Amino acid sequence: MAAFYTLLSIIFAFVIFIILPGLRVINQYERGIILTFGKYSKTLDPGLKWIFIIAQRLIKVDMRIATMDVPRQEAITKDNVPVGINAVVYFKVERAEDAVLKVENYSYAVSQYALAALRDIIGGVELDTLLTERERIAADIKKVVDTETNVWGIDVTAIKIQDIELPAAMKRAMAAQAETERERRAIIIKAEGEMKAAENLQKAAGLLSSIPGGLSLRTLETIDKLQPDPSKTVIFALPIEILEGFKALLNGKKKE
């Protein structure tokens, strides 16, 4: 009987100190890396798992897309303009065993590699290209980082350039340039409008001239619409048609 209780105690102790502590829960978005005596054994899928705690160690790896901010960095463009740039890197682990075994801290490694690639790419483009083709430059940075981090089991899904900070003197110069450009466009639009108006007036004058008495009628209509101030004097220029008519009338009377 004593032997039975001794065996029962051993089993109970085994369950308490070996079985229960070895139970692990791996969430749906995680994978578990098992190291047996320090050597990689296997990768566990989500669910309730058990490990032999005396010889094995479990390392959980989050497989979801992670967002990492690349802090503001100073970079110099190809045309020697210093700019401050910060970006955001989106990446996820594709192969959990490579992310654990091939790099010490994959998040930090991705951040530093993205930072280096950002400086290299920006140094090869001019400021105007950087400002107008931000998406293309971000895609180029993503391609470089994704190629190098693939060996770590990391997939870089996207890199977004958030802010581009320019020197104060450059901002003032660009503002002045933009203002000059707006004034130039306004002058061109005004000139085009005046040219169109002149063409329409020319057509209208030609049409009125082709109608007998047309210009006289137009003059009378204009006079009728005027409401001059009594304190001011309004001088009307008579059309040449009226003057020629008076001249012909006077010549006729002289002949009589």
Image (tube, rainbow, N blue to C red):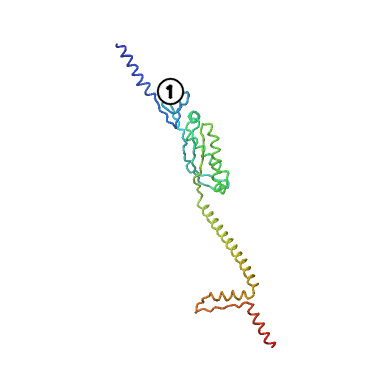
Observer-nearest of 72 and 34? 34
In the image, taking residue 183 as reference, residue 3 lies left or right, namely: left
Tell me: residue 10, above or below residue 216: above
Residue drawn at (64%, 73%), measured in percent from left and top? 211
66 relative position to 253: left or right: left
Residue 215: percent from left, percent from top: 61, 74
Mark 1 surroundings within 10 Å by alpha-carbon count, few (fewer than 14), some (14 through 19), many (20 or more): some
Mark 1 is on which residue type? Gln
Q: Quadrant of residue 32?
A: top left
Q: Observer-nearest residue: 223 or 171?
A: 223
In terms of secondary structure, where does tag 1 sit? strand
Percent position (x, y) of residue 214? 62, 74
Work out whether residue 64 or residue 223 is closer to the camera in this orientation and state it. 223
Picture residue at 49% right of the left edge, 38% below the top: 90
Residue marked by disc 1: 56
User: Residue at 58% across / 78% down in the picture?
Assistant: 236
Q: Residue 19 in the image: x percent, y percent?
A: 38, 21
In the displayed image of the protein, which residue is found farthest to the right? 255
Q: Is residue 68 left or right of residue 245?
A: left
Q: Position of residue 85 (x, y in %)?
A: 50, 45
Outermost residue toward the front in this view: 212
Q: Residue at x 61, y 66 (%)?
A: 200
Does residue 240 appear left or right of residue 121 in this picture?
right
Query: How many numbered marks does the figure carry?
Result: 1
**Most distant residue in the left direction:** 1
Q: Quadrant of the C terminus?
A: bottom right
Q: Is residue 111 above or below residue 203?
A: above
Q: Quadrant of the N terminus?
A: top left
Tell me if residue 133 comes above or below residue 216 in the rendering: above
In front here: 166 or 128? 128
